[in-house]
Amino acid sequence: MNEGIAQRLRGAASEGPQALRLSLRELLQLHGEGSGAVLLMLMALLSTVPIAGAGTVLSLGIFALAGAWLRGRDTLPLPERLARLTLNETWTRRCLHGLAWTYERAERWMCPRWQALCHARARFWWALWIALMAALIFLPLPLGNVLPGTSLMLLSLGWLFRDGIALLLSAATGAVGVGYAISVGHLAFAAWQHMGAWFGL
C-alpha cells in the first residue's frame, strides 16, 4: 500500500464520468493487485454500504476467503456473481474517497510492529475470525454489518502493514460486534416471549 493507490482512487472519483458506477472487480483492478487482504478490505467496506442483498452475497465471499486463508492461500478467484456487484453513482464516489482516506491515514499511522500477530502460524486463528465476522454480516441485524465490517477492514490493514496493534483493534471491534449481536438476539427473544405471553401462546 502506498499514497499512489490513494491518488489513483481519488482520481477515479473526480475524473470519472458523471454516472460513475464501479463493480467489485473494477475496484480491485484500481488497486493494481489482487491479494487476499486487499479483497477482504473491499468486501468488508462494501458490506457496510446499504445495498439490498449485498451483505448476504459479500458474507458468502468472505466465508470463501476465510476458507482460502485456512488452506494457506493468500488469493481467491473472484466468483462472477460477486465480481459483478455494482455500486450506484453516489456510493461509488463515497467508497473511492473513503478508501483513499483510509489508505492515507494507514500510511501515516501504521508500521511493522508486534509482528508475532502477523506470523504465518497466526493465520489459522485470523481465518476463523474472518469466518466469525462473515457470520455476523450474514445475520439480518439492524446496522449489524458496521462493526464486523470495520473489524475486517482493520484486519486487512494490519496484515498489509504487518501491524499487530491494528490486528488487536480488529479483535476488539469485532468483539463489540459479537456483543451487539448477542444483545439484539436477546432482546428479540425476550420480545417474542412477551408477545407469546400476551397472545396466550
Image (cartoon, rainbow, N blue to C red):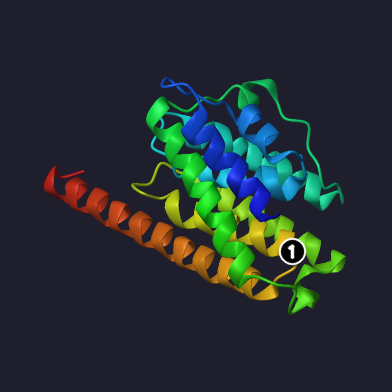
Residue drawn at x 54%, y 48% is 99
Residue drawn at x 43%, y 52% is 146
**Quick check: 113 left or right of 181?**
right
Count numbered badges in the picture: 1
Identify the amino acid type marked 1: Trp
- Residue 25 shows up from this direction: yes
Looking at this view, is 28 or 101 the one in front? 101
Name the residue beneath numbered marker 1.
Answer: 125
The location of residue 165, given as percent across then percent down, is 64, 75
Check disc 1 and report its element: helix, strand or loop. helix
The location of residue 19, given as percent across then percent down, is 42, 20
Residue drawn at x 12%, y 48% is 198
**Quick check: 56 left or right of 114?**
left
Compared with residue 129, is residue 169 higher up or lower down, i.e. above or below? Answer: below
**Quick check: 122 left or right of 8?**
right
The location of residue 21, given as percent across then percent down, is 49, 23
| Image quarter of the N terminus | bottom right
> Which residue is most to the left?
198
Compared with residue 108, is residue 29 higher up or lower down, i.e. above or below? Answer: above
- Residue 47 shows up from this direction: no
